[in-house]
Amino acid sequence: MAAKLFPTSLPHSNEVEVMGVKKSFIQLNELEPASENTNEQDKDVPNVNKDDVEERDSWQAVHPTLRERNALMFNNEQMADVHFIVGPPGETQRVPAHKYVLAVGSSVFGAMFYGDLAEGQSEIHIPDVEPVAFLILLKYMYSDEIELEADTVLATLYAAKKYIVPALAKACVTFLETSLEAKNACVLLSQSRLFEEPDLTQRCWEVIDAQAELALRSEGFCEIDLPTLEIILQRETLNIREVVVFQAVLNWAAAECRRQGLEVTPSNQRLVLGKALYLVRIPSMTLQEFADGAAQLDILTLKETRDIFLWFTATKKPRLEFPLMKRSGLMPQWCHRFQSSAYRSNQWRYRGRCDSIQFAVDRRIFIAGLGLYGSSGGKAEYSVKIELKRQGTILAQNFTKFLSDGSSSTFPVWFEHPVQVEQDTFYTVSAVLDGNELSYFGQEGMTEVQCGKVTFQFQCSSDSTNGTGVQGGQIPELVFFS
């Protein structure tokens, strides 16, 4: 007599009932041999032939690929031969798994289950991995699917590193790189150092250097560990005023006091900072900045305060424990899009109209400002509004003034903070000037400009109402960091 096929839905137990007899999940795939002697009772029992099997598809047939069938086993008790207790005490989750699948996907699991020192444990405790991250890891190993979110990606990266799953680790790093911005750059720098991810570390430094004020003023800066704080304070290329660095260090120290259960006082802030305080380049502040800030906050000793005042003012300067030289910062680069400039008696006029151009780059950069032409009729002052947009959304703008000396030179106008610009996407920069109507203007414009390692592409902007385009007009330069 042939065995009856199990139902098309995957059974929740390893046994199902066939003709009153319990059969295992695997046994149901085998046909029992028919008896040679058929009596009257046997005639009442229907035989299951090949046609019957084809008419009632099994769950394996419904999911024809190995990947689909493996995916069904993810977080499934069916045929599970190991269980993990994942998470710290009090927050654990019990996760079923299959040793063979895990061993195929990870050399760590392979050694754990099938190596020379393999143990036959049916339950394994993993207190240092978050349950959600462990499930993301297992889902990838069962199905090749990767589901990452901002609040779980770091925990997932830790799990991928712990169990040596490089493809998942790479996906986590890529996710972090695409979500990297000034407010999380310091935290990600700390994590990238911990996980030994040099590419991510380099990307973090690019953001921190170019957008240092935003990065150090962020809440994320206060969450970093002391070694990462010290490395940031030693950074020569931070694009930042030292008075902002000093205030950021005080904010970090206050947060560290709270983490250690200490009252936030100047003495405790100095205590948690230790030698890191002497990495702040206090002598590179202006005398006014020092007098209005650090000198009044009691975090320095009286002797240190006196010696710094003497260093600013005395002929014979005392020896200081603080670095003396100002940070070099980043050197701005200038993209020139015109090959020549000119002026005529009836051009270039403003009257509050907008000059605008679109650009794209082939690698990520930080736009810091614009170079603009000034008056062709002698010395003049201009009021100007500059703006950077992406797909109609304003990313940065600034209202300011600049003084033109009457020459054909360009004059820099800066955004408040450098703005991160992604590759292969068109952005729009605009300038609305008010002042002496007659100005220099650019000629022989280029649609593509190579500037160091960055290639710029230009195209006309529909926002331009004053005649500026690719071939000629205003906005002769883009100022950027890369």
Image (spheres, helix red, strand yellow):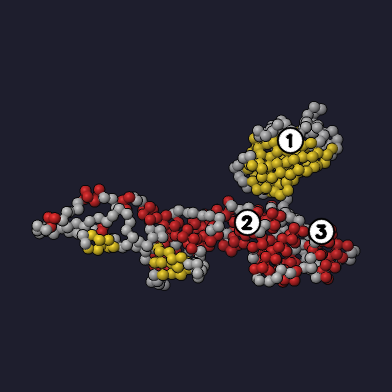
Q: Amino acid at mark 2?
A: Asn
N-terminal of the pair, mark 3 or mark 2, is: 2
Look at discs 1 and 3 and give the one toward the viewer: 3
Determine which of the numbered discs, if any, sits on residue 474 in the image.
1
Residue 107, given in percent of the width and then of the height, sits at 44, 64
Q: Which type of secondary structure does the marked residue at label 1 adopt?
A: loop
Q: Amino acid at mark 1?
A: Gln
Residue 228, given in percent of the width and then of the height, sits at 65, 63
The residue at 74%/67% (across/down) is 277
Q: Amino acid at mark 3?
A: Glu
State the residue lying farthest toward the right: 315
Q: Is any atom of residue 270 visible in this view?
A: no
Residue at the disc numbered 2: 184
Dot 3: few (<14), some (14–19), or many (≥20) neighbours within 10 Å? some
Q: Quadrant of residue 349?
A: top right
Dot 1: few (<14), some (14–19), or many (≥20) neighbours within 10 Å? many
N-terminal of the pair, mark 1 or mark 3, is: 3
Residue at the disc numbered 3: 289
Is residue 221 left or right of 139 when viewed as pictured? right
Q: Is residue 381 above or below residue 416?
A: above
Q: Is any atom of residue 403 visible in this view?
A: yes
The residue at 70%/38% (across/down) is 430
Dot 2: few (<14), some (14–19), or many (≥20) neighbours within 10 Å? many
The answer to whether the residue labelled 3 contacts the one labelled 2, judged by CB atoms less than 8 Å apart, is no
Is residue 133 left or right of 446 when viewed as pictured? left
Residue nearest the viewer, comparing 79 with 65: 79
Q: CA distance from mark 3 to mark 2?
A: 28 Å
Is residue 317 left or right of 141 when viewed as pictured? right
Q: CA distance from mark 1 to mark 3?
A: 37 Å
Figure quadrant of the N terminus: bottom left
Q: Which type of secondary structure does the marked residue at label 2 adopt?
A: helix
